[in-house]
Image (cartoon, coloured by chain):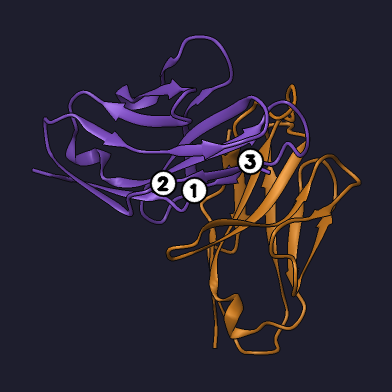
Chain colours: A orange, B purple
Amino acid sequence: NAGVTQTPKFQVLKTGQSMTLQCAQDMNHNSMYWYRQDPGMGLRLIYYSASEGTTDKGEVPNGYNVSRLNKREFSLRLESAAPSQTSVYFCASSERGAQGNQPQHFGDGTRLSIL
Amino acid sequence: AQSVAQPEDQVNVAEGNPLTVKCTYSVSGNPYLFWYVQYPNRGLQFLLKYITGDNLVKGSYGFEAEFNKSQTSFHLKKPSALVSDSALYFCAVRDGTGGSYIPTFGRGTSLIVHP
């Protein structure tokens, strides 16, 4: 049981390049999330998907797009990378539960550097 | 609106001593509270949660947390710290009475356990 799998683990981009971060979960969870983690900032929500077929903006969505490809997969795309998007990106999933009383399960992150 | 504060960026404790990592929260309704731990180069791992019931919640790796409604706190505790407990700890909260089911995370507290 792999849980939440993120690819790639590391990536270096040049400013203006595009890329897609992949995330897949094998726990049959309805909800999936993308966060970024920066020193001293904690976790900030970029986008989330409450269920297959729906996506919503989080706290810091500018410069990103997402696709909920199916129940298992939720990808994050940077269309034109900027140095400010250098960060560690985490994907998470959860059962929605009764009004959100279920914990989230996190992948091990993608470390992204933009030069 | 919901918010969470972790007032200490870093906590230092000697191995074998008790440890406390502090968390205070603010929600309009009933709080759902979570603690997560993050080891270097890994994603967040769920430790424990408070939804309702007993104010003392027991979780993984010998950790426990005490919910205090009057002080709006949910401090993480362990009777005897191990060097292997050294990690980054995050508190999260969501309002269980309604609204978004997305939790809000604190900025994290770095726990350092000295041999």
- The disc at residue B103 is 3
SS for tag 2? loop
Report the amino acid beneath label 2: Gln
Label 3 packing within 10 angstroms: few (<14), some (14-19), many (20+): many
- Name the foreground residue: B91 vs A18: B91
Say if mark 2 contacts mark 1, CB within 8 Å.
yes
Which chain is mark 2 on?
A: B
x, y percent for residue A31: 75, 39
- The disc at residue B6 is 2
Residue corresponding to mark 1: B106
Task: Measure the alpha-carbon separation of dots 2 and 3.
Answer: 15 Å
Which chain is mark 3 on?
A: B
Same subunit, labels 1 and 3: the answer reads yes
Residue at image point 61% right, 48% down: A5
x, y percent for residue A69: 85, 52
Q: Quadrant of residue A75?
A: bottom right
Q: Residue furthest top?
A: B53
SS for tag 3? loop
Say if mark 2 contacts mark 3, CB within 8 Å.
no
The quarter of the rendered structure image containing the N terminus of chain B is top right
Q: Quadrant of residue B22?
A: top left
Choose the circle earlier in sequence order: 2 or 1: 2
The quarter of the rendered structure image containing the C terminus of chain B is top left
Task: Measure the alpha-carbon separation of dots 1 and 3.
Answer: 10 Å
Task: Measure the alpha-carbon separation of dots 2 and 1.
Answer: 6 Å
Which chain is mark 1 on?
A: B
Report the amino acid beneath label 1: Gly
For discs 2 and 3, the disc positioned in front in the rendered view: 2
SS for tag 1? loop
